[in-house]
Image (cartoon, rainbow, N blue to C red):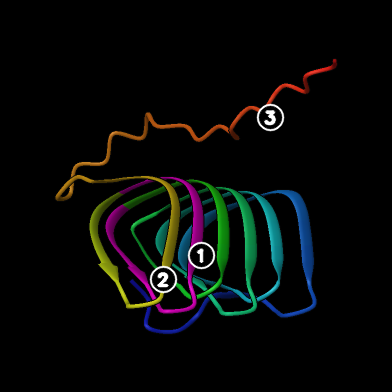
Amino acid sequence: MSKNTDTIIGEGIVFENALLKGSGVIRIDGRFSGTVDIDGHVILGETGLVSGEIRADSALFAGKYQGNLFIRGTLHMTATAVLTGAIETGKLIIDEGATINGTCNVTNGVVQEKIRYEEPAEEPILVK
């Protein structure tokens, strides 16, 4: 894994319905919706907002994420991280203050990549 950041999506930048695929280190400080498939490391900065699916070797999250997350190695959530969805990771580090809304499966290094997160159904409206 490269020690330098190879790709940066800066604060104020928006990618919608995108596919980001490759290797190296990516940092997201802006908004991204779509799929990230990286042989490498993903950094979600405090101002980052991602919805979709991420597949990576490792990740450091400080921002907000919603969707399906598959991390083959270690996922580190800082105190400001908020993850909503289905998480599958080899190892998990959670700093005090981080939030997970959904499911989390820590596999000790074996990621199945079969989980899917679905929004809860809305409560039916009863008409009298």
Of residue 87 and residue 33, the one placed in the foreground of this image is 87
Of residue 127 and residue 63, the one placed in the foreground of this image is 127
Would you name the residue on which mark 2 appears? 98
Q: Earlier in the sequence, mark 1 or mark 2?
A: 1
Q: Position of residue 84 (x, y in %)?
A: 52, 52
Q: Is residue 29 above or below residue 24?
A: below
> For numbered disc 1, what is the local secondary structure?
strand
Instruction: Check whether the beta carbons of the residues at disc 1 and disc 2 lie within 8 A of each other.
Output: yes
Q: Residue at x 41, y 71 (%)?
A: 98
Q: Residue at x 72, y 65 (%)?
A: 31
Instruction: Check whether the beta carbons of the residues at disc 3 and disc 2 lie within 8 A of each other.
Output: no
Residue 82: which numbered mark, if any? 1
Three-letter amino acid code at the position of disc 1: Val
Mark 3 vs mark 2, CA separation in Å: 26 Å
Q: Earlier in the sequence, mark 1 or mark 3?
A: 1
> For numbered disc 2, what is the local secondary structure?
loop
Residue 121 falls in image quadrant: top right
Q: Is residue 13 above or below residue 18?
A: below
**Residue 74 is covered by the magenta coloring:** yes
> Which residues fall within the magenta stretch?
72-88
Q: Is residue 22 above or below residue 79?
A: above
Mark 1 or 3: in front is 3
Q: Is residue 126 above or below residue 55?
A: above
Residue furthest front in the image? 128
Residue furthest left in the image? 108
Mark 1 vs mark 2, CA separation in Å: 6 Å
Q: Residue at x 49, y 77 (%)?
A: 80
Of residue 33 and residue 67, the one placed in the foreground of this image is 67
Three-letter amino acid code at the position of disc 3: Glu
Mark 1 vs mark 3, CA separation in Å: 22 Å
Three-letter amino acid code at the position of disc 2: Ala
